[in-house]
Amino acid sequence: MNYKLPLVITFCAGLLMILAEFIPHRPFGSISANIEIWFLIITGFAIILGQISLLKMNIIKVVYKLPNWKYHLATIISFSVMFLVGILYGMQKQPGLLGHGEWLSSALGDKPFDYIFANIYQHLMAAMFSILAFYIASAAYRAFIARTLDSTLLLSVSIIVMLGNTSFGTSLTAGLPQAIKFLHLPNLSSFIMDFPNTAGQRAILIGAGIGIIGSSLRIILGIERSWLGGK
């Protein structure tokens, strides 16, 4: 009985959204617009619930001094500071509870929230992606080892694309006659990116779209119930 009401609501909402796409007339258009507004409202409450859960999880680990509890303490402090300055002084052109915080903005050169975001968060994010670049290079090296036909093909194509986007690769084939300009590395690189790569990406997107349709139908029809907490 506890599962029947959510399943009925999901079925009706999903069916209305599908009908609104194929019958863009009243009342389906207005109903789908209202459902989208409700979705945004629910999303707002879901974000609040996620923030509370995040704080609760990190506070528990700090209180009981579980492994790496200092990192969780840093998370709590960072979250609290960003939340407070955003609520009190706002961000960009939006005022907070205490207005725009002119005295802090004049001292920092920007609003506290925007200052922390631009001068701390963005630099930390850049540092993180810089570190990830080494892991990506390591993974690419292992993937490009020519052991099988597939890995050999991947290695060959990757070398052509990388060389084709460098001045060194351009100079390697610059002496080839114009009659076989297709074999110039920049042209080969452009051909691979424009045709085989684009075709592969579209095939992946089509497969993902079909998978999303199948999963959505399973949820709407009540076949998939894992989102309710069941199996």
Image: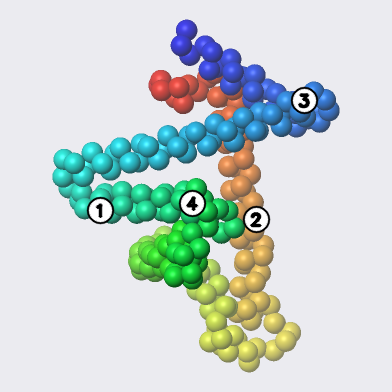
Which residue sits at x=67%, y=62%?
A: 195
Residue behind mark 4: 98
Residue behind mark 3: 28
Residue behind mark 2: 199
Where is residue 74 drawn, in percent x and y?
28, 54
Kind of element beneath mark 4: loop
Label 4 vs label 3: CA separation? 43 Å
Nearer to me, 67 or 218: 67
- Tell which circle, 4 or 1, labels the residue nearer the N-terminal end: 1
Query: Dot 3 surroundings within 10 Å: few (below 14), some, or many (20 or more)?
Result: some
Amino acid on which the number 1 mark rests in the picture: Tyr
Kind of element beneath mark 2: helix
Residue behind mark 1: 71
Residue 140 seen from this side: no
- Tell which circle, 2 or 3, labels the residue nearer the N-terminal end: 3
Query: Dot 1 surroundings within 10 Å: few (below 14), some, or many (20 or more)?
Result: few
